Image (cartoon, grey):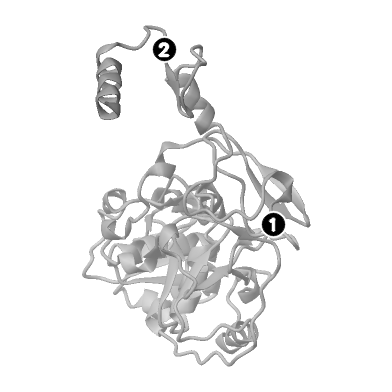
Amino acid sequence: MRAALIALLIALFLIIPPAADASCSVAGCGGSGGDSWETGARDFMDSDVPLIGVSQTGTGDSQELGTTSSFRAGASVVSPANGTYQQIDREPTTDLILPDFRSGLFIKGDLLEPISAVSGSDLLLDVSNQRMEGQGRAKGAISLPVGEFLYENGTLKPVPEIAQILGAAGVSRDEPAVVYSDSFSSGEATLMVWILCYLGQDRVRAMDGDLKRWMYQSLPLESVARTRNSTTYDYRLLPELRADSGCIESGEPQLVDARTFQEYGKSRLPSAIFIAPEQVLEDGRVAAGEKLNDTFARLDKNRPVVVYSQDLFKASLVWYALQLMGFDSRIFNWQEWDVEEPSGAFVIR
């Protein structure tokens, strides 16, 4: 009898249609007929529900260092700085939700590390030059400003001195390194990649983006500076990554001028072509391989390429993009060109 009664109730429930004005919110169906599914969904998206995979140890102002607030499109990220919370404005961009594994777009994609692939086993280096004490950085990163490896005039310090700085920071040549900075377009990360490659680092990659993109993905920050025990940096130079005047005078390499167009128009090395650093960038990171193919269309992959500029940061951006596309690229500092020698006279062609 009881089973028959239950069956009858189920049948009535299936036959009788719901009221025309009944609706369900994302919280479930109930008596609040005024709530629509769309309104409920919007409320859910605007809530502070944490994202999957994003570590949060508190809520609101009580969040501990090393975490970020929940992500909401068009909202702001809150990050710790000097013991307080600093609001960083941002605009929602569609590319933030696209997969960031772009290594396959380049011939030597192993020089590029997707942000989501950065792991705790990597030596993560924050090489930003403009960094205040206590300002947030990617969790686990060691602060090592790339400017420490340059003289005030922008030329590179001697290799033994560079190795000493790396060793004092606890960096060893045989551990995989991932490099990033506050802004990829600054060239800070690519210059550090070049320096480490020049010194023979076993494996070094630039992070595919910068600190802003790291925060866009709601990845954790920390403001406490990390330190490591000092070590000896056993460098093994790769001289083919750095060109000298003899290399240029040989006529073997192709020359790329990475200075401003105005400087290029005033004076340049013979047969040099102009490629601005902005031409190898797109959306705040290195441009995709298809665009780089167009940018480097005038260059022969069977010949080495020397990129020169008085600004090593700019030169390194073009050098790095060339490396990604499989070119034998090198850097030459324009300031090292000896204009007093007859062979070093500027020639405009």
x and y percentages locating residue 107 in the rendered image: 26, 64
Nearer-the-camera pick, 71 or 239: 71
Nearer-the-camera pick, 38 or 18: 18
Nearer-the-camera pick, 190 or 205: 205
In this view, 4 is above or below 202:
above
Quick check: can you spot residue 270?
A: no
Q: Amino acid at mark 2?
A: Ala
Is there a contact, CB below 8 Å, between mark 2 and mark 1? no
Secondary-structure class at tag 1: loop
x and y percentages locating residue 287 in the rendered image: 37, 51
Label at residue 22: 2
Q: Is residue 181 left or right of residue 321?
A: right
Q: Residue at x 72, y 47 (%)?
A: 86
Q: Residue at x 41, y 12 (%)?
A: 22
To which quarter of the image does residue 130 belong?
A: bottom right
Distance between the alpha carbons at the discs numbered 2 and 1: 43 Å
Q: Which residue is mark 1?
A: 64
Q: Amino acid at mark 1?
A: Glu
Secondary-structure class at tag 2: loop
Label at residue 329: none
Nearer-the-camera pick, 223 or 317: 223
Q: Is residue 85 left or right of residue 290?
A: right
Q: Residue at x 64, y 88 (%)?
A: 230
Query: Mark 2 or mark 1, which has the lower sequence index?
Result: 2
Label 1: how many residues lie within 10 Å, few (<14), some (14-19) or many (20+)? some
x and y percentages locating residue 83 in the rendered image: 78, 56
The quadrant of the image that shows the N terminus is top left
In this view, 13 is above or below 344:
above
